[in-house]
Image: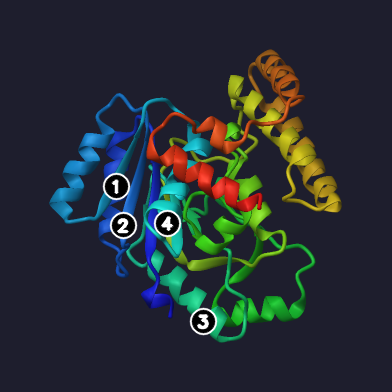
Amino acid sequence: MVAQLRVVAVVVAHERRELLLESLRALAAQKRPVDLVVVVDNASTDGSADAAEELAHELDLPLDVIRLVRNTGGAGGFAAGLARAVAGHAADRAWLMDDDTVPGPGALAELLAVDERYQWLGGARPAVMASRVLWTDGRDHPMNTPRRRPLARRTDQALAARAGAVPVRSASFVSMLVDASAVRRHGLPVADYFLWNDDFEYSTRLLRHGVGLYVPTSVVEHRTKVFGATDADPGPRFRWEVRNKLWMFTRSGGLAWWEKVVYGGSSLRRWVRTFQRSQAPGVLWAAARAGAREALRAPRTTAQVLAGLGPVSEQAAGLEAGTRR
């Protein structure tokens, strides 16, 4: 039964102490309690790790803080946290989120209820489940909208609808519930992405032949500074957008060839809009050239990126090695 599953929440944190504490308070208030929270502190200097431990003690919230000595970015943080949850804490499901994610009290309960109902109706065990993500004013956050599964069969759509969900092809790390068996089969996020597109690559890899469900009754709030889509001007960080998309389209097995054409065209259109709206297109061009140059080499393995970080390095390397057997 889904109610008996061991669920470990993974929160990746970097220099946002107060937001992290809000996230932990929301996790402690879940109607269906999490069994454990893993906080991955990406070398914060604002006391995030100590504050998290103090608050968890006050709230009686089971907590494991991974204090990384260097910032591995969101990609490295989620890879490390997922490795700890699955290999270190025997999670059946890992619930992934950023430190600026505040889940509603019923967010986890709704994900698990739909998970159970979908399987009871005859569906395969979902590899990924995604929540509805709102901004601080209640609008759906365009940055975190899951992509519906194209060409989904009517029977699959009907089955998902009966369970209270929608079939999806990808999802974001802002409230993504991941099945541990899928992690053991497909490995971890590519830590070398550092920032951006790591969740797109990872979720498409898990969902190329797996089931992904969007659950609109599971609601979380993503407290980003501004409300915006992925074509907002990123400045010098555009380098990561270009490099990681090129890595994904040329080196990842997450997408079929025709999907690469579709999503590649969508990315190009979004990049055009980004340049059109930019106040400093020269900065974007320099970042794009840098990203394209970096994409000529293959990304390092996640085990290589996370090496030298203590027990979590061994846990990540073990999971990666298991997928190569």
Q: Which residue is mark 3?
A: 117
Of helix, strand and loop, which one carries label 2?
A: strand
Query: For mark 2, does the 10 Å Cα neighbourhood hold few (<14), some (14 to 19), or many (20 or more) residues?
Result: many
- Which labelled disc corresponds to residue 36? 2
Mark 3 or mark 4: which comes first in sequence? 3
Mark 4 or mark 2: which comes first in sequence? 2
Inspect the image, locate mark 4, and give the three-letter code of the amino acid beneath it.
Answer: Val
Who is closer to the viewer here, 138 or 117? Answer: 117
Of helix, strand and loop, which one carries label 4?
A: strand
Mark 1 or mark 3: which comes first in sequence? 1
Q: CA distance from mark 4 to mark 1?
A: 22 Å
Of helix, strand and loop, which one carries label 3?
A: helix
Does residue 241 appear in the picture of this structure? yes
Query: For mark 4, does the 10 Å Cα neighbourhood hold few (<14), some (14 to 19), or many (20 or more) residues?
Result: many
Q: CA distance from mark 1 to mark 3?
A: 31 Å
* CB atoms of marks 1 and 3 within 8 Å: no
Does residue 142 appear in the picture of this structure? no
Residue 150 % position (x, y): 76, 62
- Which labelled disc corresponds to residue 220? 4
Query: Residue at (38%, 70%) from the top-left corner?
Result: 109
Of helix, strand and loop, which one carries label 1?
A: strand
Mark 4 or mark 1: which comes first in sequence? 1
Q: CA distance from mark 3 to mark 4?
A: 21 Å
Inspect the image, locate mark 1, and give the three-letter code of the amino acid beneath it.
Answer: Asp
Who is closer to the viewer here, 241 or 314? Answer: 314
Query: For mark 1, does the 10 Å Cα neighbourhood hold few (<14), some (14 to 19), or many (20 or more) residues?
Result: many
Q: Which residue is mark 1?
A: 64
Query: For mark 3, does the 10 Å Cα neighbourhood hold few (<14), some (14 to 19), or many (20 or more) residues?
Result: some
Q: CA distance from mark 2 to mark 1?
A: 8 Å
Labels 4, 1: front one: 1
Q: CA distance from mark 2 to mark 3?
A: 24 Å
